Amino acid sequence: MAKKRELKSLLADYAVPIVFIGLSAVAIPLSGFSATYLIQEMLTRLARNSFLVLSLLIPILAGMGLNFGMVLGAMAGQIGLIFVTDWAVAGWQGMLLAAIVGMPIAILLGYICGAVLNRAKGREMVTSYILGFFINGVYQLIVLYCMGNIIPISNPQLVLSRGYGIRNAINLTGLRHTLDNLIPLQIGTISVPVATYILIGAFCLFIIWFRRTKLGQDMRALGQDMAVADAAGIPVERTRIIAIVISTVLACFGQIIFLQNIGTMNTYNSHDQAGMFAIAAILIGGASVSRATITNVFVGVVLFHLMFVVSPMAGKELIGQAQLGEYFRVFVSYGIIALALVLHAWRRMRDKIEARRSLRGE
């Protein structure tokens, strides 16, 4: 009976990655893509998206759930990229300058987000999601009406024909693949973005180190029980704000890395996709609302983007329409988040039942 319960618990904990591994096993042969092509795509997408997904770990450690407010950091990064493109600063210097410009904006937005979430304890995810919509409105007001009007923009290629407002798409020519090509490595026909992986590896080491610090231990205590942490003298609200600020700043850097790989920036929509896809990826990797590891990040990015690559061709082979793959992407992004939240609620209920059973000596 105990083994059966353990197996059931294991299947429930890893239901999402198991489903995606099964889907991948079916879709990869149907897509007809070669192993070389898929390896190249996964290496590129892992480098492009991992930093953004890793930025979600610290709020989960602090018991604040999935940080839908990471889009605030992505917006800050995009503002930095707009200014750098206007000033015509190219190369790694341009990326560094974009990060320097975006960082104080991300800190300010992270502090606002943390202060709001302190007033919505227990409802952080839905609050950060709605806050993202509000700040998105402010961002679009600044970019669409203030830039070129109140905020000087000298590059005419960035400004709309009316004389103010930023164009919908910005060509990041000077920054395209700057980090990816900094340390080139070619293995046969496969190109490996070594510098990007070094940066991601350094970030992983930072997270491992951070968890062992006093602040990291305080966040871990908060994640386990906020009331006990408060009774132990941990400054709960201050620590929660710091967790969100760190996550927002890291999301700012992650969006800059993401967009230098893409080479084009969708001024008004890029940040929305970054937040939703990052959260879906970490959940597919086996993370939950209350527990996530670095392994979950990398497994999730690979599984999520593997389905992104193979699903259009698999859909075309199955029913003759590649558009099915596009619908599947949207379904996966929102459906996985909904499934993760349902499983989280079920696990909490299961843990309460188990606790009552242990008290009764069953």
Image: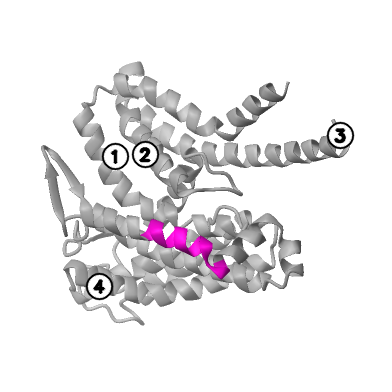
Q: Distance of mark 1 from mark 2, alpha carbons?
A: 6 Å
Q: Earlier in the sequence, mark 4 or mark 2?
A: 4
Amino acid type at circle 3 is Gly
* Residue where numbered disc 2 is placed: 302
Dot 4: what SS?
A: helix
Q: Distance of mark 4 from mark 2, alpha carbons?
A: 31 Å
Q: Is residue 70 above or below residue 86?
A: above
* Of the pair 166 and 362, the residue shown nearer to us: 362
Q: Earlier in the sequence, mark 1 or mark 4?
A: 1
> Percent position (x, y) of residue 154?
22, 78
Q: Residue at x 23, y 74 (%)?
A: 86
> Percent position (x, y) of residue 57?
50, 55
**Residue 111 seen in render:** yes
Amino acid type at circle 4 is Val
Q: Is label 3 or label 2 in front?
A: 3
Q: Earlier in the sequence, mark 3 or mark 4?
A: 4
* Residue where numbered disc 1 is placed: 42
Q: Distance of mark 3 from mark 4, alpha carbons?
A: 65 Å
Amino acid type at circle 2 is Val
Q: Earlier in the sequence, mark 1 or mark 2?
A: 1
* Residue where numbered disc 4 is placed: 84
